[in-house]
Image: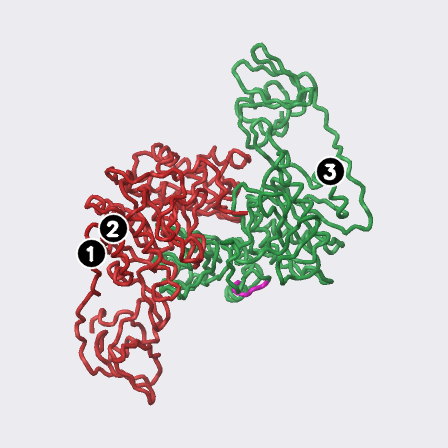
Chain colours: A green, B red
């Protein structure tokens, strides 16, 4: 029996199934003590436990059956290759703006494993459209699966691919682009796209969901309706991230792509604009602009600069931080290090030697603050100047995450470290905010 | 001329001064073109630039003179060893509670370098008392310099020393203890002390200042008055951190020691209680309790558990994170790693092998979230379970910084990794908050 016929099954249970010559899709009969179950054997996700098998019963319900000593499995029917029938799509309404939805994965496109209660990536943007049919009243939707990955596995290759695909969609006439993305690293990807695709004629809007679509409190539908509206009608042509503004479904807020961060692990309003003001809000079916200055929709040709250097690390300093980490990066030929220092941009003096060594080896270094809010200022304290003297560039009010992305991009799109440093320090798309903003606290 | 006679002077300027046989404290005459200056040569701080010398003129003003080609230096008077005369202290008022102020350094005890505008550590707690004489009306103050370090240089040795000193002061009859500390790593130290000294009879209050005391907007005095008040009179006996609640001087807020974080690089209200409620507030000269449950002042004997394992790292994950960092820590014999993962507690699958290796090597591993707010939950997504299966412990709503400190402490005070893990997961002093709190946003 080939391995692929039992995806997700491991250990003793796999042995048992292999021995019974059954594979996923086969109709099986399971005997366990006095009990007996019949149904189609379903696959397990790779990461599920290894002591349950799942069958879909004739009733349509899935059940998980735990491995016990007296479990017997018997094949009662061959697998029938399932015929794929996508759900019917709502009719396209001519005359509406064209919005391209590019799916990359995440909770907004995920399903539940009924045995473990865990969630895994599955649904296509096409599925989303069938689940949220009102999208068809807002725009002519074209849905497209680019990736199907949990966002913790997103890397710069994906950013390169997203920029390329967005560019294609715009050239094919999209009036706005939506990218569905897992929320974990969505802030990093949003920052990456602000740099990787520039001179935009239309909005590019990242969206995710903090609650999977099988849950009553899911934010998938509300978020999607808002971002498709914005992609179709918003007056701005920037890379932004649209998610719940607060606990209510009434308001979806659009954060500028380079100034946004996930600041809550589970709340629907997990994302916050940091050191800047949000760009716009969707409320009562309309887009309200918040920011005074923004790039308007225009007749321009988007430009791609989508190379990212991989040998760049974001390093968070802490008391007792061991300098071998910096030495390791230097020795491994890293081209850049972004520090997340304390306060205005400090690390302990025990790191000076390792930083000096990295500087001599030509490693581009920048400083951000683990405070997250505020900006670094390495001229206030003597320790700050000890670092700038060793080649560490203060990165003002850049988020640590955006600083990492910007350094990867700066090194990826230039020839020398000197050019990269210049580009790193240049305010390319509003990633630096020259004015200090205290917008975070209302008090 | 011995090296110590020219502290802070380097390069060409140092050569010039050495050649003129002058040292700090000598009266010098400087000629520069047509200009001539006379005064006492002052030291430079180690990290100042190397092209200015500073003299104190007879007028009392300090000036910096830049190194130019035709600069000439001449000694006109020998250094007189300065006689130290501390400023007179306000009289001690008998009958008031006894408050011990332990100084460890930081902005609240810092001075400005008038040439560069930089700030360096200098003032003693005794100086503080002479600057804020009203403290003498609140309590019988005993001031004490334990360390004089910028807080980015604080490490676990200092935490051990602080716990020891606090314990001594309490045993000597202090009715409350104040620790002045640089704000950069004050949150880490506060968390450390919650664990390192327990069973407290009186409050232990950390305080810092975001603006140095030479600035009109300094928060030193307001903060000190409030924390000395709380040390003398507050009904709680916990380790807390007292700083500005908002932009106004009217309210100082007390954060629970294990749930507090510096969240702004420069604002006076930089500190925030995370995933919990603040403990109390000082307003209109009085302490108002906010938390319903707290440890009250009592007749108890404080207990020290002040060992911290140094071989523990806090590692922030990011897209493109290179697993060699984990391998380096494993190979260097690290005993613990706290991850700052994404969202509910994830890292990319490219790290699984390195994490498995660390697990096999007996490295204790825990997971926190870089979201900061909220808690990790490694049962929601399959990727979370991939990590727990490899020995990564979910650390619920612990701040990453507190998790680091807790792991250092757990490993430092137990014999085996198994015991340490149990202690790490045990809620010792309220560092875990079982209830989800959304206190951060008022909306």
Q: Quadrant of residue A256?
A: bottom right
Judge whether residue A55 is colored magenta.
Answer: no
Marked residue chain, label 1: B
What residue would you read off at disc 1? B92
Location of residue B130 in the rendering, given as x and y in whole percent from the top left corner = 25, 62
Q: Nearer the viewer, mark 1 or mark 2?
A: 1
Q: Residue at x 53, y 28 (%)?
A: A49
Query: For the N terminus of chain B, which image quadrant?
Result: bottom left
Magenta stretch, residue numbers: A424-428
Q: Nearer the viewer, mark 1 or mark 3?
A: 1
Q: Which is nearer the eye, B112 or B435? A: B435
Location of residue B17 in the rendering, given as x and y in whole percent from the top left corner = 26, 78
Q: Quadrant of residue B53?
A: bottom left
Q: In the drawing, what numbered circle is on residue A130?
A: 3
Q: Nearer the viewer, mark 3 or mark 2?
A: 2
Q: Secondary structure at mark 1?
A: loop
Q: Secondary structure at mark 3?
A: helix
Residue B222 lies left or right of residue B20; in this view the side is right
Q: In the drawing, what numbered circle is on residue A263?
A: none
What residue would you read off at disc 2? B99
């Amino acid at each position: 029996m080939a391995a692929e016929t039992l995806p997700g099954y491991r250990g003793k249970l796999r042995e048992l199934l292999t021995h019974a010559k059954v594979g996923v899709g086969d109709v099986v009969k399971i005997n366990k003590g006095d009990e007996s179950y019949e149904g189609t054997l379903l696959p397990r996700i790779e990461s599920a436990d290894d002591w349950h098998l799942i069958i879909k019963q004739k009733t349509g319900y899935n059940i998980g059956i735990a491995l016990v000593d007296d479990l017997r499995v018997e094949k009662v029917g061959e697998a029938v290759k399932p015929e794929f029938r996508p759900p019917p799509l709502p009719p396209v309404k001519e005359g509406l703006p064209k919005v391209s939805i590019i799916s990359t994965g995440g909770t907004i496109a995920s399903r539940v494993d009924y045995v473990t209660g865990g969630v895994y990536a599955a649904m296509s943007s096409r599925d989303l459209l069938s689940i949220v049919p009102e999208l068809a009243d807002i725009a002519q939707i074209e849905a497209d699966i680019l990736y199907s990955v949990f966002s913790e596995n997103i890397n710069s290759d994906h950013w390169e691919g997203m920029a390329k695909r967005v560019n294609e969609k715009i050239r094919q006439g999209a009036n706005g682009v939506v990218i569905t993305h897992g929320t974990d690293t969505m802030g990093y990807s949003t920052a990456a796209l602000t740099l990787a695709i520039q001179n935009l004629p239309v909005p590019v809007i990242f969206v995710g969901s903090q609650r999977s679509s099988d849950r009553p409190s899911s934010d998938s539908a509300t978020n999607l309706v808002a971002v498709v509206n914005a992609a179709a009608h918003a007056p701005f042509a920037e890379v932004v991230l649209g998610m719940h503004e607060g606990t209510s479904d009434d308001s979806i807020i659009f954060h500028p792509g380079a100034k946004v961060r996930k600041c809550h692990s589970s709340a629907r309003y997990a994302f916050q604009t940091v050191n800047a003001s949000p760009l716009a809000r969707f409320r009562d079916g309309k887009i309200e602009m918040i920011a005074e200055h923004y790039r308007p929709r225009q007749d321009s040709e988007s430009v791609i600069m989508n190379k990212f250097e991989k040998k760049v690390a974001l390093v968070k300093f802490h008391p007792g931080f061991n300098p071998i980490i910096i030495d390791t990066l230097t020795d491994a030929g890293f081209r850049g290090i972004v520090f997340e220092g304390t306060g205005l941009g400090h690390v302990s003096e025990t790191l000076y030697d390792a930083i000096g060594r990295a500087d001599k080896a030509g490693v581009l270094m920048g400083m951000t603050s683990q405070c997250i809010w505020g900006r670094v200022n390495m001229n206030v304290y003597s320790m700050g100047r000890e670092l700038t003297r060793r080649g560490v560039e203060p990165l003002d009010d850049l988020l640590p995450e955006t600083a990492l992305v910007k350094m990867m991009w700066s090194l990826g799109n230039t020839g020398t470290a000197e050019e990269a440093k210049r580009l790193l320090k240049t305010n390319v798309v509003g990633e630096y905010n020259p004015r200090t903003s205290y917008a975070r606290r209302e008090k």
